[in-house]
Amino acid sequence: MADYKDLDRKVIKLSKQVVRMCAEAGSGHTSSSLALGHLTTALLYRVMRYDPKNPWHPGSDRLILSEGHAVPIVYAAYCDLGGVVGQLNQASELRFSDATSLRAADSVLDGHPNPAIGFPFFDTATGSLGQGLSAAAGLALAARMSGSAQRFFCIVGDGESREGQVWEALDFIVDQKLTAVRAIFNCNGQGQSDYVSSQQSPYALGQKLAAFGWDVKEIDGHNWDEIFEALKAEPGEKPVAIIAKTIKGWSVSSLQSVASHGRAVAEDQVAAALAELDAKAGELGVAELSDSDCAKLTEPLPISPPPGGAISAGSLSEALQAAGLGDALAAKKLSTRRAWGAALAALGADGRVISLDADVKASTFANLFEKAYPDRFIECKIAEQNMVSAAAGLAAGRRIPFVSSFAKFLTRAYDQIEMAAVTNSNIKIVGSHAGVSLAADGPSQMGLSDLAFFRAFAHTHRADGAPAIRVFQPSDAISAFKLTEQMANLDGLCYMRTHRPDVPFIYDENEEFTLDGFKHLIDGEDIAIVASGYMVHVAKQACKVLEEKAGLSPSLIDVYAMPLQTDEIMQIGDDCRGQILVLEDNYAGGFAEEITTAASKSDLGVMVETMCVPRIPKSGRSPEELLAMAGLAVQNIVEKVQKMFDQSEG
Amino acid sequence: MADYKDLDRKVIKLSKQVVRMCAEAGSGHTSSSLALGHLTTALLYRVMRYDPKNPWHPGSDRLILSEGHAVPIVYAAYCDLGGVVGQLNQASELRFSDATSLRAADSVLDGHPNPAIGFPFFDTATGSLGQGLSAAAGLALAARMSGSAQRFFCIVGDGESREGQVWEALDFIVDQKLTAVRAIFNCNGQGQSDYVSSQQSPYALGQKLAAFGWDVKEIDGHNWDEIFEALKAEPGEKPVAIIAKTIKGWSVSSLQSVASHGRAVAEDQVAAALAELDAKAGELGVAELSDSDCAKLTEPLPISPPPGGAISAGSLSEALQAAGLGDALAAKKLSTRRAWGAALAALGADGRVISLDADVKASTFANLFEKAYPDRFIECKIAEQNMVSAAAGLAAGRRIPFVSSFAKFLTRAYDQIEMAAVTNSNIKIVGSHAGVSLAADGPSQMGLSDLAFFRAFAHTHRADGAPAIRVFQPSDAISAFKLTEQMANLDGLCYMRTHRPDVPFIYDENEEFTLDGFKHLIDGEDIAIVASGYMVHVAKQACKVLEEKAGLSPSLIDVYAMPLQTDEIMQIGDDCRGQILVLEDNYAGGFAEEITTAASKSDLGVMVETMCVPRIPKSGRSPEELLAMAGLAVQNIVEKVQKMFDQSEG
């Protein structure tokens, strides 16, 4: 029988540090951390093949702490190991004492794991529960594409396993045969406010995991032999899930009640808690032992990550021909969703580009990529949350994932998208069938609130000052194609919105699209019309009517990106009798607010009127019927402009 | 052996109508509908205890079509039965021929089920997948509370069962022992773009459902004996799940390939499809049979739904005393989340009020309700999506559910919330720990994008002209208490945002809060400061500094509701040197946009500056540290106002 006294000693040391650091911070999940003392020590000091001095090594085994609140125990260990933090060009080593900076404003030891603030040991931000296993799956996909035998250890809480996304990930990992993922369920039997349901008992979890096609190993999460046997087990056909029975607040009695979740030990009880851990050390016969040579680390694996550099989609003509869409070139008419698909297929010549879709590839046109690069097309089935978090894992594995579904269905994954934004994850999200032009399928399939949600992130900055999410809404196939190429080359999270109907080309194939986000299509002098996406086409028709029937000369501006540069647009508005009309096929909160915000801060005194979708729509058989329902038909716009013009005259 | 010839005849008739109606609409999921011909006929003509002439009967068995795209077969049957549609006071009977109005702009037969547009046979809008079983659970909870033995038949697609929410619902139904729910999995083996994964095969589903604690019955979904035996089975301890193996595009060969999802039969192939169904009728020996007396309906059950009427929370003092928070009255200090919990507990005197929480009751303070009314407190565990959809089911069952979790975690359920808005569902959503004042836990726990998302719905109207969602952000305990009472009495979806820190009372206990959404707290003349929620307290401190140090006299307006009435605020801005500064502790897109939009449409020429959270935050140990990180500290505000003032002078 192996001697684990040095590991026992280490667990005591780290546990004491966890008690101290949470007490110092005044908060932190002490009890959850103590439940993971043995598992963390086994992983970080013995099992994982990695180098704490180089957490960026692309061939490392990785730990994904899905129950992010238990992070203090990992911080304690990583500090003890002198782990490196910061940015690649500005790295520094932690010391054991640094752990007590937990949750301080100037510390990289955030309340929950977050690589973006300088803790590169982790790949994705966690803390909103249920997302880690999906991220691990994405990392494992990337590793497999690089031919690497890395392993991805993911710790999931028992209460956390109630989140549906966990079961999406379990299906996905089996579908994709990602046996490099080792799922560890930390079964301490307690949730945040109560005991976990019997539906999440070790027994129930075991039954479920087996039914989902996993090889289940149930262990005592504080027994070294059982821990090592399970962690080192090589999977066969099935991926391995470890059910680790643990004690929340291990060895600290005051932390073991069900009311102790998320609690730091009170200042005046710290000494007692530490004494309990010392007593445990005595009981284990390790009170006097040194823990200094506990770590037996194995080097990361050699790996050749994909090279960097710019990615080209080539010319639209060639891409459309390659995608079998040559007819569109002659007709000069194509939907933005199809143009996106053709662009994606063209970008696929770069091995970093991956396409993930949620069983709607024939509608989003991700199937154009699949046809060209079947090995890099990942069918995620109807499980959008797992898809987005898996993409975040792929991005952490240095891939450039494009995630596609109907814009409406991606609403399902807004929490996951927000966590990807916290991570500064380099994923590209494409929502199709946006707006009311989808028509017949009705509001359950239409993306209408998406621009309001994503605009919030377009105006939120990452640490480096770039927008947390860049938003694109192309109006035609040319802009869709060019902006897709641009998304692939931008560093960071992007969202693109595409539409169902075929629409005429607006731009020449050689047009370039800057991040300023607008094109002045028609230069007029009576009212500036600002439109985005599908509404640009409706606006063009309205402009024609206004010219021919009313003798008016409106300006027309196509806005296609957020954040939007608005100075010149304000100037155009000022030149057009100081009046702007914004047109959108979504609920309030999108491009209209880009313009109204600019106008309210500008001293030009431009007045802005907005027309967006003012009601929850229903089905209709054509885009025109839906536009009429939303008060966005050509005639509505003509009347509105006429009214604004009359007022400016009057 | 029973004779099912009349049912066979009916299935043929309805199937032919489905082919016709989708062809007429030019779209619609013909093949999915044909897979459900037998199950729908069994349910609507024989098994369900309901009255198609009175779909509002509160004691009806209900059908929840989670895979909403298969709705044409239900419409065909309901029209055949002369089912009633419209509103209670303006109802009309459908005829068989009405089915061909599918998806027309003036038809109640929307592309996907939606009671809000006048199809009351359904309780909640479906179409975004995976939500129906949760809604069924909510309906079953309401029925149990009313002592009713209603049954809730929920049809879920096999591909759809990949959605994690389905597994959340399965757990929830077992936890809550809701055996009135009968889950029917329609296993036709095809998804939207491909075959379903082997993870969703009838065998795999059966294994999983059994592991989740369900009594599984596998049947041939086109075999009457097996269908009736399964549908009529009385559950024991375990809820019953039926795995029905079906054929997508039953009896129409052109619809059976995997590329046929969501397809209407082309105009020139309709005759051939109908001929195939006629041939099938011949094969079954029912070609000449009348189907006229097929329906053998059973009356709905007698039931006493809870009475209506206004709900009172009583006085704040009494509610706080009752909740054990009497000390706060003396201290005049309490967090908005605690005040919400006390209000909820007080409202619980009305039996319609239900509290649902996702394992954070001790943090949201839903536990105050639980303590008072344990039978009406529903612990949903860590599964926010199921919680929201279950609440929609409860609301359909004439209850008034309050759904609480951290605002951040509710992001997880934005798709479900949007579907509840499509339904016009009367649910109340409360997100706690909003904004940066949460501090130490970091961005994975902070609600920052919520106001941008919900504002989109505050400006979207329901059919009756009311906002799709009303949004509230109280600044103190008094307003939190009063607005909670108001939410309970409003008809429709409401969202309230509460904060973690204790804050001083701002208002007198007798203050009333209108839906105008603002209070003019300080009447000044140099810059109008508009603040919401926690930021009102920061703004008050800034005002004090501005008065004492700079001799300025700012106005201060507390804005607490969206949609916000802005006319008077614009006037106040105009009176304050034409300048307004808006303060928010969230990302862009919330109250600031209420003001900028108003300003840009107003001819008063008021200039607006906004300060919100401009970056993705990280942990800090105090709200003050986080405010400083976001540039929202008292000093930042003072400097900004001083600068605006200087410019207005210069």
Image: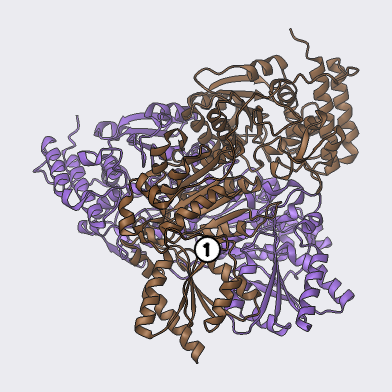
Chain colours: A purple, B brown
Which residue does the numbered mark 1 point to in the structure image? A457
Residue at (8% x, 43% y) in the render: A288
Identify which residue is drawn at 78% across, 21% down: B295
Percent across and percent down for residue B548 are 35, 82
Q: Position of residue B235 (x, y in %)?
A: 55, 18
Badge 1 amino acid: Phe
Quadrant, the C terminus of chain A: bottom right
Residue A204 coordinates in the image, percent (x, y): 42, 27
Nearer-the-camera pick, A179 or B17: B17
Measured along the vertical axis of the image, is residue B244 above or below residue B373? Answer: above
The answer to whether residue A404 is left or right of residue A555 is: left
A513 displayed left or right of B171: right
Residue extending farthest left: A288
Q: Where on the picture, by quarter, is residue B277?
A: top right
Image spot of residue A339 (x, y percent): 71, 58
The residue furthest top is: B1
Mark 1, secondary structure of its residue: helix
Q: Is residue A47 left or right of residue A132?
A: left
